[in-house]
Structure formats: C-alpha cells, structure tokens
C-alpha cells in the first residue's frame, strides 16, 4: 500500500530543505531595465528560492526597499539576496566577466542554447550570470554583444515570449 501524500509544514519543511543537495553553480542575475516593479519583486522571490547569490539592477529597474504590496510579492527576499545598482549593464559586465562568470542573456537570438539543452551546456561552467531584459524590448543590443551566449525557452503557442519573471524562474530552475 502506498503512503498517503501529506503536505509538509513547519519543522518538516525545514528538515526537507536542509537535506536537499546544494546548487552546483554560483549564479547571479542582472535585471536590465525592468519597468514593472512587481516583476522585480517576483524575481527577487524566485531568485532567493533558486539560490541566486546576487542581483544587479540596472537602468530603470525598481530598487528595494519595496512598498508594502511589493514586500508581500517578494516575501522579503530583498533582505536575503544581495543586490547592487548600476546605471548601465555595460558598467558591470567587465567586473562580472573578470570574476569568471559565463554571461547568458535570456533572449531569443539567432545563436542560442535551447532550454532543454541548458543543463548539458552549463555542466562545466561553475559561475553563471543570467541577464533578463525589459518587458517590451528585451536585452539591449549592446549588452547582447557582450554576452557569451543566450538561452531561449521554446514557445509552442502564438505568443513569442513569456513574462520576464516567469522566464527567469523557468531558467533558474531548469538545471
């Protein structure tokens, strides 16, 4: 007879996650010109859950502290994930690259790694930086030129993209 499924709560949740294996990669995320604060707050929550080391906010991206409504969305993750601000992504990419990060845009490009192949592609890359771009225009063209590669999520419907926070979450939990 199979054991009945039981939702974990309290101490059982902590015990479950304490025994999980740690991430094999060091990950940072750059949020480039994210115009909607709710997307930034959602990405902070997702990034914290995915074990992201740092978030860089650039351009018009909303910076913490978040208001009461956005704190509810982020679940306080802005207090758990280190973050920095820079006017332009190009201002921080040299530092990121000098620290050994492999830089990947989350973007549809002519030369990319498809999501199903990402785990294999990253297996020998211990430090990864993902760049998520603006909701309307994506990652800046000048930023793309500085990336090592891009990762693309296959789309099966008529819409060519997902919301930036959804895309970022899919990528962060795919390997």
Image (cartoon, rainbow, N blue to C red):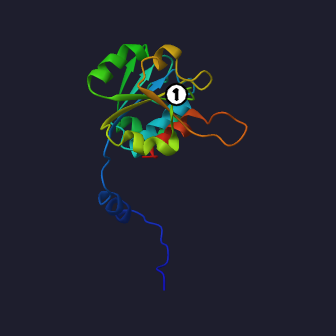
Residue lying at the far bottom of the rendered structure: 1
> Percent x, y for residue 166?
56, 40
Give me the residue at 52% from left, 17% from top: 140
- Residue nearer the viewer, 160 or 65: 160
Q: Which residue was labeled with disc 1?
A: 111
> Percent x, y for residue 115?
51, 41
Give me the residue at 32% from left, 17% from top: 94
Give me the residue at 34% from left, 58% from top: 17
Location of residue 107 (image quadrant): top right
128 over 142 or under it: above or below: below
64 over 42 or under it: above or below: above
Location of residue 11 (image quadrant): bottom left
Location of residue 12 (image quadrant): bottom left
Residue lying at the far right of the rendered structure: 158
- Residue 68 appears in the figure: no
> Percent x, y for residue 85?
39, 20
64 over 140 or under it: above or below: below
> Percent x, y for residue 157?
71, 41
- Residue nearer the viewer, 133 or 124: 124
Within-10-Å neighbours for mark 1: few <14, some 14–19, many 20+: few
- Residue nearer the viewer, 49 or 71: 49
Q: Secondary structure at mark 1?
A: loop
- Residue 20 appears in the figure: yes
């Amino acid at each position: 007879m199979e054991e009945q499924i039981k939702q974990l709560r309290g101490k059982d949740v902590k015990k479950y996650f304490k025994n999980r294996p740690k991430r094999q990669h060091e990950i940072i995320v750059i949020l480039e010109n994210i115009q909607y604060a709710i997307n930034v707050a959602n990405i902070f929550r997702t990034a914290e859950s995915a074990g992201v080391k740092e978030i860089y906010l650039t351009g018009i991206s909303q910076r913490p502290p978040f208001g009461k409504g956005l704190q509810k969305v982020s679940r306080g993750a802005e207090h758990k994930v280190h973050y920095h601000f820079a006017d332009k992504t190009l201002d921080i990419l040299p530092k990121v690259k000098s620290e050994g990060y492999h830089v990947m845009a989350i973007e549809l490009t002519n030369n990319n790694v498809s999501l199903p192949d990402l785990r294999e592609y990253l297996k020998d890359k211990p430090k990864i930086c993902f760049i998520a771009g603006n909701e309307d225009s994506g990652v800046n063209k000048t930023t793309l030129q500085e990336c090592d590669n891009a990762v693309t999520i296959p789309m099966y419907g008529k819409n060519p993209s997902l919301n930036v926070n959804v895309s970022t979450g899919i990528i962060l939990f795919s390997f």
